[in-house]
Image (cartoon, helix red, strand yellow):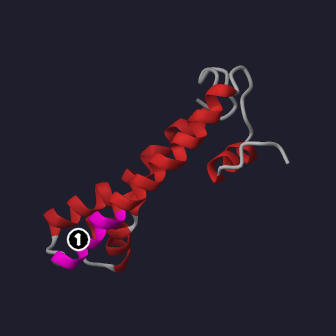
């Protein structure tokens, strides 16, 4: 809803951003029980690819698995709420590509100009 045309947008490189967590989770392969691997398995943006890698390569405890799943579910719920706000206002702004500052203001819920 925030890009008019990905072929002509100046921000089309942001479409590759979702691949970053998968690339970062490759650090789990080197040391599956290290601090970086534990952080990546708990951090919601990287836990989806990193936790399964840790489950295959080592034995994380049940508390760590549950904490990762709860954090992931909570952040997915929050992201859905914020994305709904941005999408709602973005659809009303048809024809104009918003700036990053406008998108952040929409995410906070302040849709009116101040």
Image position of 48 (left or right of 84): left
Task: Out of 59 and 88, give the one closest to the viewer.
Answer: 88
Image position of 23 (left or right of 105): left
Q: Determine the residue located farthest toward the right in the rendered image.
A: 114
Write down the quadrant of residue 29 in the picture: bottom left
Residue 34 position, x and y percent, is: 31, 78
Task: Out of 101 and 38, give the one closest to the viewer.
Answer: 101
Magenta span main SS: helix
Residue placed under numbered mark 1 in the picture: 66
Q: Is residue 73 visible?
A: yes
What are the residue bounds of the magenta stretch? 62-71
SS of the residue at dot 1?
Answer: helix
> In percent of the image, x 68 and y 22: which residue is there?
94
> In percent of the image, x 49 and y 48: which residue is there?
81
Image position of 2 (left or right of 19): right
Q: Is residue 24 visible?
A: no
Image position of 68 (left or right of 109): left
Q: Quadrant of the N terminus?
A: top right
> In percent of the image, x 25 and y 63: which residue is there?
51
Asked if 77 appears above or below 34 in the picture, the reply is above
Magenta-colored stretch includes residue 70: yes
Asked if 39 appears above or below 78 in the picture, the reply is below
């Amino acid at each position: 809803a925030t890009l008019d045309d990905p072929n002509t947008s100046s921000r089309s490189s942001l479409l590759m951003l979702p691949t970053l967590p998968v690339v970062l989770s490759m650090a789990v392969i080197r040391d599956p029980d290290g601090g970086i691997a534990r952080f990546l398995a708990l951090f919601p943006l990287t836990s989806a690819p990193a936790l399964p890698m840790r489950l295959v390569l080592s034995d994380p405890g049940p508390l760590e698995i549950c904490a990762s799943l709860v954090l992931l579910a909570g952040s997915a719920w929050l992201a859905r709420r914020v994305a709904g706000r941005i999408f709602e206002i973005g659809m009303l702004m048809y024809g104009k590509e918003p700036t990053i500052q406008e998108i952040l203001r929409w995410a906070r819920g302040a849709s009116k100009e101040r």
